[in-house]
Image (cartoon, helix red, strand yellow):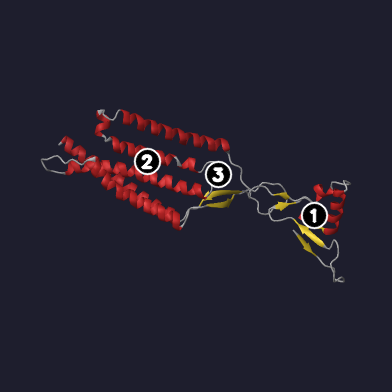
Amino acid sequence: MCVYRPASNVQSWTRGRYQCLCRKGYYSKNDDGVFNGSLIEVAWLEQKENISNAWDELFTCKRCAPGCDVCRDEAPCLAEYKWPFRLTLLSISVFCVMCTVALNVYMFKHRKLKVFKVASPIFLSITLFGCATMYLEMAAIFPILDQYSCIATKWSRHLGFCITYTALLMKTWRVSLTYRVKSAHKVKLTDKQLLQWMVPILLIMLIYLGTWTFSDTPNAEEIVDNQGLKFKQCVYNWWDHSLAIGILGLTFIFFVFERLQCGTTQRICTG
């Protein structure tokens, strides 16, 4: 980018009366990226006549390192990823997903066994599916973090948690009703009935995540470390905090409910 600099005593255009600057995102090792117009013209003529290489060596702007808006040299602006550590975490996550899928296949293949049949194969599969969804959180932010990665991270983490614990809650609720009813007739809650109760809970989570995604799309923000290098991290705002408080509250309620249910079952079985 060149800017004309007219002389104070000359009104007309004068050759060489301009300065050239490197564009934003580029730098030059000479003169801080500011070039005199007269020297540029001389270097260009020498380049055309093959007299000198000053044009390529002195008057060329180079692109800054990735992540740099303005720079003076080739120094990096982005923090370097520790790829061995990231690959290790990714491998563990993928291994957990594969183990979860393998368990699901094994359980489905032997679903007629008494231990699986009593525990409800459908809800065991749903629980394992939710666990696999949560394990995919690490894969969502690999290899780099951007807006779509942040969206996938929020959905995989929270939706997987909701699927897993809702399935466990339904199973526990069935056991609770079975032991609490004092009628002579056995209360039988089918898997279909429990699934009908489970759908509204999942629907609420889907509406929450969908509203979050479209109204305040999760994005990656740049953060500067102690060395002045930038790295990206998903934005955390009141959507995250509200959901975290809700999950903690539900987890506490679920824990208390489980403890009470265990006590009730033990009293009935020993009574």
The residue shown at (45%, 40%) is 136
Residue 140: % across, % down: 48, 43
Asked if 84 appears above or below 214 in the picture, the reply is: above
Q: Quadrant of the N terminus?
A: bottom right
Report the residue at 34% width, 46% height from top: 251
Using the image, tell me which numbered label, if any, was put on residue 130: 2
Residue 270 place in picture, x, y as percent: 17, 35
Q: Which residue is mark 1?
A: 31
Query: Where the C terminus falls, by quadrant?
Result: top left
Amino acid identity at mark 1: Asp
Which amino acid, by three-letter code, is at mark 3? Ile
Q: Earlier in the sequence, mark 1 or mark 3?
A: 1
On the rendered structure, is 265 left or right of 248? left
Q: Is residue 259 visible?
A: no
Task: Say which residue appears at 57% left-offset and 51% top-offset.
Answer: 223
**Cα–Cα gap, marks 1 and 2:** 59 Å
Question: Element type at marker 3?
Answer: loop
Q: Residue at x 34, y 29 (%)?
A: 106
Q: Position of residue 129 (x, y in %)?
A: 37, 39
Q: Is residue 165 visible?
A: yes
Residue 134, numbered circle: none
Q: Nearer the viewer, residue 105 or 240?
A: 105
83 w.r.t. 155: above or below: above
Percent x, y of residue 187 = 16, 41
Q: CA distance from mark 1 to mark 3?
A: 36 Å
Residue located beneath label 3 in the image: 144
- The residue lying toward the viewer, choosing from 74 and 227, is 74
Please say if the residues under marks 1 and 2 sit with CB atoms less than 8 Å apart.
no
Q: Disc 2 residue type?
A: Gly
- Of the residues under marks 1 and 2, which one precedes in the sequence? 1
Tag 2, which secondary structure? helix
